[in-house]
């Protein structure tokens, strides 16, 4: 079985079809929306007179992704420059490529939810319903990935249950501590218990790993003639997102989440993997020096058991063979189709690297590793 853990549903819609149309008067401009999505933390931390223009920053996004952002903020105003998705389109593409099943993430309209303040729970539910309805003809091959608002943990559990009933097998998490409470806190156990009892994977996707530039890091004179300008600004904004991912995984490990919930899985997507080897080594070393550790598995063993990661060439993962050789049980296959950093022929793209490995390693990477995750929760995909 070949299982794509990260593709997206991008659609072309009119305002009347937009899942968040009731909030249209609060939509940002496309330039501001893209800036928020790809450089928002640094933009907020940079003095206003030192910020590169939003219209310049948005040019760094691939054309298909820019077009999807236009659809989100100004629906129906231009012809889309991306593959317009539907269940039929997605299944036809999967059949051509040889993919059996897929976790389908929402399109770029999802980030509007984060701009709606107290209305975010309503917006999340609307986006979830939109995705589930668009995929309902996908049978047991297309699994919608749900958005969740974690400011209300009881509400989060209700949304997980509601969306599992609609076919969802995964949900997005965010590498922060809503309300000042870490995801490692026992208060969160109700969420992790619900996830595993429902057979759902927690996904940490790019865009949900906010970088921290407080304390003056944004005040770097980006518009000074001797500075690096918008290019340097964009690169800096996206250079340390893995720090948030590492912090969240470490918090869950050393806070005991994976010990209390041994069947829980966190899946990292589009976070590049250059940081991954050093992180695994560091966690393994620290785990050997943790006095009073109450669990049967060490922290390093938990990391390999409870965490999966999807390397992606378009995000800079050019060392897939090395990652597979070192972490054959942790790496899982993804396409990121139809986004600009993804690929429409993803298996061919990495075929040379895969040929270096025996069949069992290739099979684990392409599908068995993620299938095993669902099986151990007692709700296998067949």
Image (cartoon, rainbow, N blue to C red):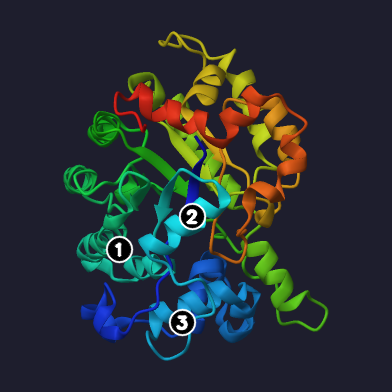
Report which quarter residue 227 is drawn in. Answer: bottom right
* Label 2 to label 1: alpha-carbon separation: 14 Å
**What residue is disc 3 on?**
70
Give the secondary structure at mark 3.
Answer: helix
Query: Which is more foreground, mark 1 or mark 3?
Result: 1
Camera-nearest residue between 202 and 75:
75
- Residue 56 horizontal side relative to residue 174, left or right: right
Report which quarter residue 314 is drawn in. Answer: bottom right
- Residue 371 horizontal side relative to residue 120, left or right: right
- Regarding residue 250, the answer to whether it shows in the image is no
Near mark 1 (Cα within 10 A), the count class, few <14, some 14-19 or many ≥20, is some
**Residue 251 at x, y percent in the picture:** 45, 33
Q: Pointer 1 and pointer 3: residues touching (CB < 8 Å)?
A: no
* Label 1 to label 3: alpha-carbon separation: 20 Å
Residue for point 42% across, 47% down = 103
Q: Pointer 2 and pointer 1: residues touching (CB < 8 Å)?
A: no
Give the secondary structure at mark 2.
Answer: strand
**Residue 83 at x, y percent in the picture:** 50, 71
The vertical placement of 138 against 301, above or below, is below
Near mark 3 (Cα within 10 A), the count class, few <14, some 14-19 or many ≥20, is many
* Label 2 to label 3: alpha-carbon separation: 19 Å
**What residue is disc 1 on?**
134
In the rendering, which numbered label is found on residue 97? none
In the rendering, which numbered label is found on residue 7? 2
Query: Which is more foreground, mark 2 or mark 3?
Result: 2
The vertical placement of 38 against 26, above or below, is above
Name which of mark 1 and mark 3 comes first in the sequence: 3
Give the secondary structure at mark 1.
Answer: helix
Camera-nearest residue between 56 and 164:
164
């Amino acid at each position: 079985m070949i299982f794509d853990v990260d593709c997206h549903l991008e659609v072309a819609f009119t305002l009347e079809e937009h899942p968040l149309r009731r909030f249209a008067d609060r939509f940002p401009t496309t330039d501001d929306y893209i800036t928020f999505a790809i450089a928002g933390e640094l933009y907020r931390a940079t003095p206003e007179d030192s910020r590169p223009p939003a219209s310049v920053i948005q040019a760094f996004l691939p054309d298909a992704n820019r077009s999807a952002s236009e659809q989100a903020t100004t629906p129906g105003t231009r012809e889309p420059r991306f593959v317009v998705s539907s269940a039929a389109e997605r299944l036809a593409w999967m059949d051509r490529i040889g993919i059996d099943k897929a976790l389908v993430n929402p399109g770029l309209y999802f980030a509007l939810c984060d701009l709606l303040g107290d209305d975010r729970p309503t917006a999340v539910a609307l986006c979830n319903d939109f995705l589930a309805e668009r995929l309902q003809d996908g049978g047991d091959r297309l699994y919608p990935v749900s958005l969740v608002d974690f400011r209300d943990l009881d509400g989060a559990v209700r949304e997980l249950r509601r969306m599992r009933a609609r076919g969802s097998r995964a949900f997005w998490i965010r590498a922060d501590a809503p309300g000042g409470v870490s995801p490692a806190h026992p208060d969160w156990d109700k969420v992790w218990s619900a996830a595993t009892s429902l057979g759902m994977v927690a996904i940490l996707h790019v865009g949900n790993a906010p970088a921290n530039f407080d304390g003056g890091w944004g005040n770097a004179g980006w518009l000074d003639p001797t500075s690096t300008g918008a290019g340097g600004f964009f690169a800096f904004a996206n250079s340390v997102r893995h720090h948030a991912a590492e912090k969240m995984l470490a918090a869950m490990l050393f806070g005991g989440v994976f010990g209390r919930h041994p069947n829980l899985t966190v899946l990292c997507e589009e976070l590049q993997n250059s940081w991954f080897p050093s992180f695994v080594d560091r966690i393994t070393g620290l785990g050997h020096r943790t006095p009073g550790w109450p669990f049967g598995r060490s922290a390093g063993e938990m990391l390999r058991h409870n965490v999966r990661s999807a390397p992606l060439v378009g995000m800079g993962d050019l060392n897939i063979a090395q990652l597979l050789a070192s972490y054959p049980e942790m790496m899982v296959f993804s396409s990121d189709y139809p986004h600009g950093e993804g690929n429409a022929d993803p298996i061919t793209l990495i075929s040379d690297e895969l040929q270096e490995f025996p069949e069992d390693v290739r099979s684990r990477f392409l599908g068995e590793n993620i299938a095993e995750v669902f099986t151990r929760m007692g709700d296998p995909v067949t």
